[in-house]
Amino acid sequence: MLLAFRWLLRLFSALIVLGLLGLVVGYYFLSGSIPAYEDQVEVDGVSAPVEIVRNVNNVPHIFGKTDEDVFFALGFAHAQDRLFQMVLMRRTVQGRLSEVFGNPTVKTDELMRRLDLYGLALDSVEAQDAPTKAALEAYARGVNARISQVNDQALGRGAPEFFFFPGDIAAWQPADSIAMIKLLALQLSPQMQNEVLRAQMSMLLPASRLADILPDDPGTASMALPDYASLMAPGLPGPGKPLVALRDPLFPVPPRDLAGASNAWAAAPGRSAAGGSLLANDPHLAFAAPTPWYLARLELSSGGVIGGTIPGIPLILAGRSDQLGWGLTAAYMDDQDILMEEVNPANPEEYRGLAGWEPFTTDRSIIVVKDADPLTVTLRWSVNGPILPGSHFDLASVTPQGHVAALSWTALQAGDTSMTAGMRLMAARSVAEAQVAGALFKAPGLNLLLADRQGIALQMVGSIPARDAAHETQGRMPALGYKAQNRWQGYLPYADNPVEVNPETGIIGNTNNRTVDRPFPQHVSFDWGDTQRIQRWTGLMKAREVHTRGSFVEAQLDTVSFAARTLLALVGADLWFTGEAAAEGTPERKRQEALALLAEWNGEMNEHLPEPLIYSAWMRALNDRLIRDEIGPMADLFTHPDPVFVERVFRDTGGAAAWCDVIQSSPVETCTDMARIALDEALLDLTERYGPAIESWRWGDAHEAAHDHPVLGQIPLLRHVVNIRQSTSGDGDTLMQGKTSGAEPEPWLNVHGAGYRGVYDFADPDSSVFIIATGQSGHPLSRFYDDLGVLWRRGEYIPMSLDPELARAAAVGVTLLSPRSP
């Protein structure tokens, strides 16, 4: 017995030693790719020595003799810190994920091949002006120089992820960077999904109820649309069990209610306490580890620029120079249309055109799939755009028999000069020059917020489709492609893009809210991204005669929900303080406790409070109760309660209170009945999740920011190392936005928000502040992987100066890139 025990002890000890040895060996190999920031590297492709000075937060400040040398160094720095992120995005837009990930990503690759974004990027390289082409080529050389350094010096393959996914890293090309902008455009536009959903709802609901569940921005008048089924040929399948949008982190198209968002606002010198223009910006994208954003400073011939970049794109997308600041928000421009093409029953290679049958443009593409046979995909284009199969975006439910769906989209333009526009924006010295640069921007549609030392402006950039006034669906639902009035008539002139320069109020801003009230077809969009944040922002701006950098920061971090303040007063109107005190432990008592808390609550979505959780769970349960009996399984698509819909119902706008009656039951339920039942359901759900003590519930426990690694974050043990989870305040309707997933098992998980925040003060430009949501490094073993995320979560910022001496004084390392000796 003793002998057996000794051998077991020896075996156990040996396993521990082997485990520790494995960890040491693993750490040795994985840590080899952590960049040495204090380094001297000889490279091909620079004309003179270039310095990459990294400050204490690992923000690179790049100084070179020429602009090309600076962009070379930016490519090198991006590849040092985010090489896997860049390669993953490139594989995504090329439709080559399945070479690495196998069958799970075939659908993504198929979509990207059909859209051919990478082919369009290749064709757009020659459309850029000479300085932009030179910058793209220099940037690509810098990325490739880092890849060569990794290979030559065996630096852990460049990133730990490459050990899990072996294979050579292809050289970076100028087209890769252009393709990144097109990928961003795909992530920012929900219009195609909106069209499908509206068509589906049109077949289930009368026009009055359709206006409830998919409401226009309040105050917007629009012509009534015909029933979708009446526009299409017989054989329309109609909605069944919905094809719920993929939530795969590698799928590039987010669900329609998680498309891009943002905040940006500016104050003219007359509304600034210090007498200089102010600008604040926080673009919103899906959270990930690392964040899509990367801080950098470039010293160009036109002057220094500093702010947020996206690795793979050699642009300061949001930031400032010494003369100009710029921020951006998603414009929610209606930049996508679905056109139903009738296929020739006698020849499936043809579709009906304006004057008869026309041939599809057809090609074949082979998708290489890891551990499976290659897949050959037939790609087809009509004059209206690429053909998408019914398996994508639930198109089958709205596609008539004998038809296929084509996508018209502004990002599919040939000769896309958006990259040149970005380069010229960085060189602009004034609001006026920035507006001129914006004329070259094609996609995505963005609101550009601008501030120089004299004034401010909002300029919408991106191509706005020109539609015929007789368009059968106004672009709100799919339409027949063979009818001339449904096709795009080109694009509106840039002069028609909405613009506001130096308004009398001295304040300008956008939270993805409606920017213009022009009738169709000059309308820009019917579907906007916000109706609630703009209300809170307007109040905060009016509350002060003059603003400061501090007040702009406070507004960025504001977590008071205008929606909660409005809805609780309506939904709970007949529930407050009714009835005698119920017995302990009963549902009635729990309801009374919850209502007592909500009655004293000011609508602040604070992570430490139970009230935001009760409110959110109540609205979620209420939304489902209101709509499920009318639309059945399609209710699964409405994962986020729309405050405008709930308000319409409880104000009985246009008879919207009809949603409160359960169709399948004999009694006529009132909205008060629905509110009470939904609250009881929500409290039961919360009790099962978080225990019976209401006072111990915390919004932050449910509303953690999920900065998850898109690949390694799915692996059971490794996920605890690479994923960054943080308790957060706010929600989808607060200025400090934190959109929830809406999906089980974590419906209130914070998955979408401000990955970058910046506030620029032109009274004292070097006092401007910045932050990103994780850290600069994409290496999980680096101390810079999540260091800025700690500050971001606390609502703190870091200063970033254009003063070279300040950058050098706080340097944690200087990388010197020198021309290779002959």
Image (cartoon, rainbow, N blue to C red):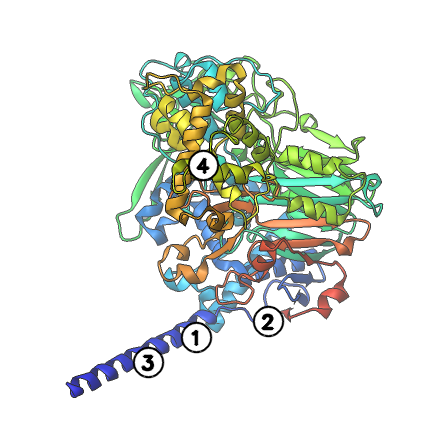
Work out how far the residue at label 1 is from the one at label 4, CA to CA, in angstroms.
56 Å
Taking the spot 61% from the left edge, 62% from the top edge, the residue there is 45
Separation of marks 1 and 2 at Cα, in angstroms: 22 Å
**What mark, if any, has residue 554 been given in the picture?**
none
User: Reading the chain from its start, which is encountered first: label 3 or label 1?
Assistant: 3
The reply to whether callout 3 and callout 4 are in contact (CB within 8 Å) is no
State the CA–CA distance, disc 4 to disc 2. Answer: 67 Å
Residue 93, percent from left and from top: 46, 45
The numbered mark, 3 or 2, whose residue comes first in the sequence reads 3
Which of marks 4 and 3 precedes in the sequence?
Answer: 3
Q: Amino acid at mark 3?
A: Val
Q: Residues within 10 Å of mark 3 (few under 14, many from 20)?
A: few
Residue 17, numbered circle: 3
- In the displayed structure image, the side of residue 243 where residue 679 appears, left or right: right
Residue designated by label 2: 41
x, y (%) of residue 46? 64, 63
**Nearest to N terminus: mark 4 or mark 2:** 2
The image's mark for residue 591 is: 4
Whether label 4 touches label 2, CB < 8 Å: no
User: Is label 1 or label 4 in front?
Assistant: 4
Residue flagged by tag 2: what amino acid is it? Val
Q: CA distance from mark 3 to mark 1?
A: 16 Å
Residue 621 sits above or below residue 608 on the image? above
Name the residue type under label 4. Answer: Arg
